[in-house]
Image (cartoon, grey):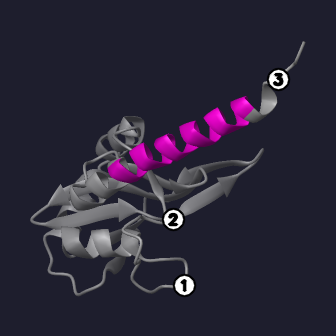
Amino acid sequence: MSYECPIPKLQRELELYKKRDRELQNALNLRAASHPEVGDYWHERYAPILLVVLVCNGQVVCLHRTQDHEDNKWSWDYNRIVIYPSIESFRKYLMRDRFGSQSVTNETWADVIPNCCSKDIEVLKEEGIYDRMAESAERPVEEPYAEVDLSA
């Protein structure tokens, strides 16, 4: 009677699942990089990278900076935004590799969770910050992006 250990088979199946999952995530990332939507949360291994808060006049407005709080908690810094002058410049930012050069793999360096931060957008609107962001987005911005301090 022969016994076949199931662990190698399970490991192969897990690797296939991971590869398929990565391919699906990459397709989602590429679509979101080319068609950003309000609420798109970009992260690298769940560390916050940016949150898309406004897409208007061809510009993409994002929160990039975070503030640390007690007990390993964080929040977005609502007073600091980054404005990409075009969807293409936003896409190029996400397509760069870790060393700053253009990616040759056609993959983003961060992953997106689409439309997951509606609570943050609501807070921005309630506190009137969203209107200030929209006003800032009306001004022309030079490539590759502009950082704007709304508290000033």
Q: Which residue is mark 3?
A: 4
Q: Is label 1 in a helix, a strand or a loop?
A: loop
Question: In x, y percent, where is residue 12?
Answer: 66, 38
Question: In x, y percent, where is residue 20?
Answer: 48, 42
Look at the image and give the residue range highlighted in magenta: 9-27
Asked if residue 149 can be seen in this view, the reply is no
Considering only vertical position in the picture, is 142 above or below 61?
below
Amino acid under disc 3: Glu
Is residue 61 or residue 46 the one in the foreground?
46
Q: Which mark is residue 125?
A: none
Is residue 55 or residue 136 the one in the foreground?
55
| Residue located 32% across and 75% down the image | 92
Q: Which residue is mark 1?
A: 99
Question: In x, y percent, where is residue 115?
Answer: 34, 40
Q: Is residue 138 left or right of residue 16?
A: left
Do the residues bearing badges 2 and 1 touch, measured as CB atoms within 8 Å? no
